[in-house]
């Protein structure tokens, strides 16, 4: 179909990570195991928070949202990646590519805003503990969570709509593991320099605004912790933030590294590995971080295991 002397493609071909069959088979097994661990880990975190009344607090409400975002983000990319490891023709229909771009971009944006919201929650818990319950009431928590989802989704909707209005001509090969924003934009047969600048500005705003909010929160948190007289008090105050701080360091650390790299020095392989980091490693590691570094979650796991062992003992007698 021709429009303004441009030909519009009906599908895209993803080049993926490798064309070697043995490597693809090995990667299929590796990423299948990691995806299953991701889904199971995040599902168990959500279930644990639901079952244990001691975890019905703002912090774990936001953690539930984070787990849902993580498993959804992984699901927007990994299943297709697994299918393509075993397929010769790695085609993605036009609408499927647009949907994947929308969901992956939206969920990535939601996660960054949600981490800023969780930083604010930790700020109130450490810096104003006596008023924590009155400030972080259920209404505010719901509004903050909705803000995270709406801001990420709105940005993604605009970016996706603008990107897929571009004429892609006959160039349908995407040298990436998924329908990534810049990789798709660069297929267009028109000048996309203004689009790339707009994407970069939007990405920096959606990344840096939450990052500065996180930074301000932790500056106040650290300042408050240093004023605590007792060593035990300082340890407990820091412990309440340790899990969140680790996740923030993982997510924002990689993002800042990506955006501070000179464009000329970045490679296609590096872009693919960064996408894999956010789609596979971060969603898999987050439940582990909150389980291993959080005393309340470890206590809840122990309670569930004791109850489960007691139930199995009764059934066996």
Image (cartoon, helix red, strand yellow):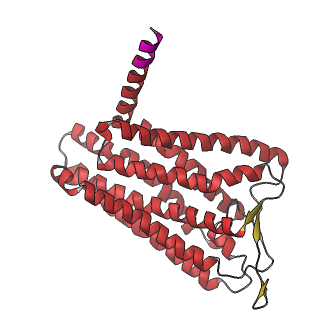
Above/below status of 253 relative to 174: above
The one of 303 and 8 positioned closer to us in this rendering:
8
Given residues 220 and 316, the one toward you in this image is 316
Q: Is residue 137 visible?
A: yes
**Residue 5 left/right relative to 136:** right
Q: Residue at 62%, 58% (x, y): give it.
A: 275
Quadrant assignment for the C terminus: top left
- Seen from the viewer's position, the closer of residues 216 and 196 is 196
Where residue 74 sits: x, y (%)?
58, 52
**Is 203 part of what is drawn in magenta?**
no
Q: Residue at x 75, y 91 (%)?
A: 4
Q: Residue furthest top?
A: 317
Q: Which residue is at 47% across, 38% downward?
A: 44
The one nearer the camera, 120 or 1, is 1
Quarter of the picture containing the N terminus is bottom right
Furthest toward the bottom, the residue is: 4
Image spot of residue 298 (x, y percent): 38, 32
Q: Residue 57 at what x, y percent from top left?
A: 29, 46
- The x and y percentages for residue 64 are 41, 48
Stretch in magenta: 311-316
Would residue 207 be seen by someone viewing this image from the given angle? no
- Number of marks present in the image shown: 0
Figure check: 250 above or below 314: below
Question: What residue do we see at 27% from left, 40% from top?
Answer: 236
Q: Which residue is at the far left? A: 130
In the picture provided, is 182 more to the left or to the right than 205? right
Q: Magenta residues: mostly which secondary structure?
A: helix
């Amino acid at each position: 179909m021709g429009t303004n002397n441009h030909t519009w493609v009906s599908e895209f071909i993803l080049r993926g990570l490798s064309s070697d069959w043995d490597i693809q088979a090995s990667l299929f097994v590796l990423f299948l195991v990691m995806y299953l661990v991701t889904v199971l880990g995040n599902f168990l975190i959500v279930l644990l928070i639901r079952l244990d009344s001691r975890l019905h607090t703002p912090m774990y409400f936001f953690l539930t949202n984070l787990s849902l975002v993580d498993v959804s983000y992984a699901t927007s990319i990994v299943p297709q990646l697994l299918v393509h490891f075993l397929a010769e023709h790695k085609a993605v229909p036009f609408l499927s590519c647009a949907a994947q771009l929308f969901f992956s971009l939206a969920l990535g944006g939601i996660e960054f805003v949600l981490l800023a919201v969780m930083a604010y929650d930790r700020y109130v818990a450490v810096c104003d503990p006596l008023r924590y319950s009155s400030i972080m009431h259920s209404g505010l928590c719901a509004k903050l969570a909705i803000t995270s989802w709406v801001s990420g989704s709105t940005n993604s909707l605009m970016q996706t709509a603008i990107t897929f209005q571009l004429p892609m001509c006959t160039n349908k090969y995407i040298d990436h593991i998924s329908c990534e924003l810049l990789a798709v934009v660069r297929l267009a047969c028109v000048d996309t320099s203004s689009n790339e600048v707009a994407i970069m500005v939007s990405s920096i705003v959606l990344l840096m605004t939450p990052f500065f909010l996180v930074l301000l929160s932790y500056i106040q948190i650290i300042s408050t912790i240093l004023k605590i007289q007792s060593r035990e008090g300082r340890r407990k105050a820091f412990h309440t933030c340790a899990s969140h701080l680790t996740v923030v360091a993982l997510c924002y650390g990689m993002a800042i590294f990506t955006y501070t790299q000179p464009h000329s020095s970045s490679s296609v392989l590096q872009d693919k590995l960064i996408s894999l980091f956010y789609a596979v490693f971060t969603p898999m590691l987050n439940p582990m971080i909150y389980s291993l570094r959080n005393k309340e979650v470890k206590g809840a796991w122990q309670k569930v295991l004791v109850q489960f062992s007691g139930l199995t003992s009764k059934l066996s007698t």
